[in-house]
Amino acid sequence: MKQSKKTLVLGASTKPGRYALMAAERLQEKGFPIELLGKKEGNVNGVAIKTELSEIGEDIDTVTVYLSEQNQKEYEGFLLKLKPKRVIFNPGAENIELEGKLEAEGVEVLEACTLVMLGTGQY
């Protein structure tokens, strides 16, 4: 079951128990192509975690955010320039200011849990 919605996991991690890791693995299981962006290099089931914004492709459909509002600041310009179809702010990652800026650019913004969305077929 190959899906076309490429998803960028922002805040990717290889640490067990991290929701970003669980989401990356679940997206792969469901057949969604992923890109991973985090602070530390590593890989999730053969997909490298990139640490530089310049390494991220432009064909991103969805960004799922696993960073606190404070830690999102350095990525704000990148997200606005990327113009994905949607951005999912997972619990703890809500950011009213950035959400408003994205919506003003025509990006669909959701405050939701990627894992729940995948589990219920709403992704």
Image (cartoon, rainbow, N blue to C red):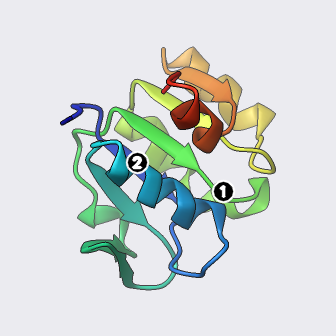
The quadrant holding residue 74 is bottom right
How far from the left and from the top, in percent, is residue 25? 43, 60
Q: Is residue 11 visible?
A: no
The quadrant holding residue 31 is top left
Rounded to the nearest angstrom, the CA distance separating label 2 from label 1 is 25 Å
How far from the left and from the top, in percent, is residue 32? 30, 42
Q: Nearer the viewer, mark 2 or mark 1?
A: 2
Left or right: residue 11 compared with residue 54: right
Left or right: residue 48 compared with residue 39: left
Q: Which mark is residue 122?
A: none
Q: Residue at x 36, y 39 (%)?
A: 82
105 vs 26, nearest the viewer: 26
Q: Residue at x 40, y 76 (%)?
A: 51
Residue topped by disc 1? 73
How far from the left and from the top, in percent, is residue 16? 61, 79
The quadrant holding residue 68 is bottom right
Q: Earlier in the sequence, mark 2 or mark 1?
A: 2
Q: Which mark is residue 27?
A: 2
Q: Could you tell me which secondary element the residue under label 1 belongs to?
A: helix
Q: Residue at x 32, y 57 (%)?
A: 35
- Amino acid type for the residue under numbered disc 1: Lys
Q: Could you tell me which secondary element the residue under label 2 belongs to?
A: helix
Left or right: residue 67 compared with residue 4: right
